[in-house]
Amino acid sequence: MPLFEAVRLAFSSIRAQKLKSFFSLVGVLIGVTFLIAVVSIVQGMNVYMTDKFAGALIGINTFSVRSQPNIQMGNTTEEQWRQWQRNPRITNADAAFLQERMTTPVRFAREGWNRLTVGWRGRDATDINVHTVDASFFEIKRWDVAEGRFFTPQEVTASADVVVLGYELAERLFQGRDPLGQTVAVGGLPHRVVGVVAEQGNLFGISLDKFAVTPITSPVRRLANRPQIIDAFHVQADDLPTMRAAEEEANALMRVRRGLRPADVNNFHLETSEAALSEWEKISTILFMALPGLVAISLVVGGIVIMNIMLMAVAERTREIGIRKALGAKGRDIMAQFIVESATLSVTGAILGIGTGILLAFTVREFTPLPAAVAPWSIFLGVGLGVAVGMIAGILPARQASRLDPIEALRHE
Amino acid sequence: MNGPTDAPVIRLEGITREYVMGTETVRALRGIDLTIARNEYVAIMGPSGSGKSTMMNVLGCLDTPDGGAYWLNGQEVSRMIDDDLARVRNREIGFVFQTFNLLPRASALANVELPLVYAGATARQRRQRAEEALSRVGLGERMHHRPNELSGGQRQRVAIARALVNNPSILLADEPTGNLDSATSVEIMRVFGELHAQGQTVILVTHEPDIAEHARRVIVLRDGKIDTDRLHPVRTTGAAA
């Protein structure tokens, strides 16, 4: 019997008992739903974490020299925490030392940071991230200008009291009016707005556009750190291998500068996006390791259910099998018929599972800040698993059917 | 058709068949010798327990004899394995059952196409030949009805069309009127008469003398042996064998 014929026959059997068929394929449906949804969410998170999270928070091909980690994921021991607290702060001199001695072609930018109130004409925005930076910081962040311009190295040298605003902060303070040339109070100190950064959206629901940037020499720097102290020294390379070389070089130079012996641990921190991502990678690895187990359990259960349904179908359709055999069906024709039917049932479950899995992934994307991206390979895997489970579950019932004695089967009521 | 036309379509030599039922051995067939020529119209009769059903199963290649030899259309089927028997059933035998044995969920056309599916015919061939067979039994108008939308007589006609669709060497009917009223029975027996007149070899298995009367040759089994084997005088149309 041709395959097409067998599949058509299978569908007509499935249609004849819609409800029973549906319940029998729920197991496979759930298994494949798991597969699609979890893979979609984890993969979506992966893309998100590498592209957006790392890019937005640290910068691409960038590392930062800090006294302690800025981004922490996962657990930190009490001891580790105390160790970081004891680390000496990074100074302008440290930055200058590195900048002078590093041979790898890189871009540098110092940064000081504080959370301050920014106000204009009596309207205040509290808890705004204020970065005091070198002009090269804008290049490292790869920001675009929405209005005006970024400040220049000359303005940094001249300690100009200028400020560049994040998109949302500008919207909130000026509410559609032109912010350029206006004077805002940053931590109470007057700064002239020269530019607005293009909108960046949000990360896990937290806005990336509520910030202000001033020159590292501007008056507001006094509110961030004591004189000569900075929070971070950013180093950016054009590509990943160069960054790695630069990182090694910076590490060695910092150890020399801090007078560390070979056995001493670093009393500074080199922060890369990889380090920030390593915790996420642990989580995603665990999810990917647990996934086959979850899927396998559902599929085994689904397979057993389908096998039972098929055994029932063979019992119910004994007479049909007898008729088919009397009319010339060979054992293998009957076997093929039931295996194809079982596989069709299972694949139907898998396809429904792919549908619900994608739906689930989209629901997560729509209603939570978590992203989701459906992986094409997981769809193929879902269908493949459906076929495999159905065929394996069908073997025993199909064999039973193919071995029925036609005389007995025809007598069956 | 295979072989010369004067060669017998069925030849049985010393066929035996035994069943073990619990501790007893039932000797259903105790040495049957029988020859049936092409285009014969034969009724096999006998009381229950005479071996009638076993005879029908052996003739229909649903069962294999324990002893003796069975040639069907020149092939020795008594030594065949299951797959070959399935092929023989498909090509050489058209079954008509008492209970019709149609697939309930399939249309008349799909039921008639079924033997052709296992013969490996293409969809177009199947459809064309199934339509021809249904027209032959006067059901050209009801091809797309399901069995439950047809009367008993119509169902049996579908079954006869299905039996004919592969041009079998023998049409083997087991109590074909057992589930039909007498008017419909007459109608169905007329169909068998017509098919015989067109050259079809027909074998009826029945316990009803009225039905057996339609055949040209009546074989009566008793205790697993042939008791009588006699020819009827010619009654209606068609030539005697």
Image: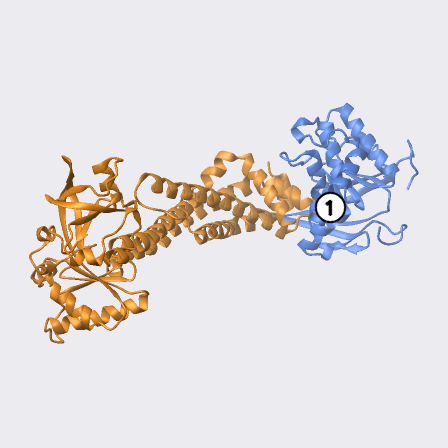
Chain colours: A orange, B blue
Asked if residue A41 is positioned above or below residue A20 in the image, the reply reads below
Residue A48 shown left or right of residue B202 in the figure: left
Q: Type of residue at label 1? A: Gly
Query: Helix, strand or loop at disc 1?
Result: loop
Residue at position x 38%, y 44% in the image: A361
Q: Which residue is mark 1?
A: B60
Q: Quadrant of residue A140?
A: bottom left
- Subunit bearing disc 1: B
Report the front residue among A73 and A360: A73
Asked if residue B224 is positioned above or below residue B148 in the image, the reply reads below
Point out the image quarter for the C terminus of chain A: top right
Report the front residue among A80 and A48: A48
In the image, residue B172 lies at what x, y percent?
A: 76, 41
Residue at position x 48%, y 50% in the image: A383
Residue at position x 26%, y 59% in the image: A273
In the image, residue A116 lies at what x, y percent?
A: 13, 45
Residue A212 appearing in the image: yes
In the image, residue A405 lies at what x, y percent?
A: 62, 47
Residue A125 appearing in the image: no
Number of marks in the rendered image:
1
Asked if residue B56 is positioned above or below residue B148 in the image, the reply reads below
In the image, residue A207 lies at what x, y percent?
A: 25, 44
Residue A94 shown left or right of residue A338 in the figure: left
Residue A412 shown left or right of residue A196 in the figure: right
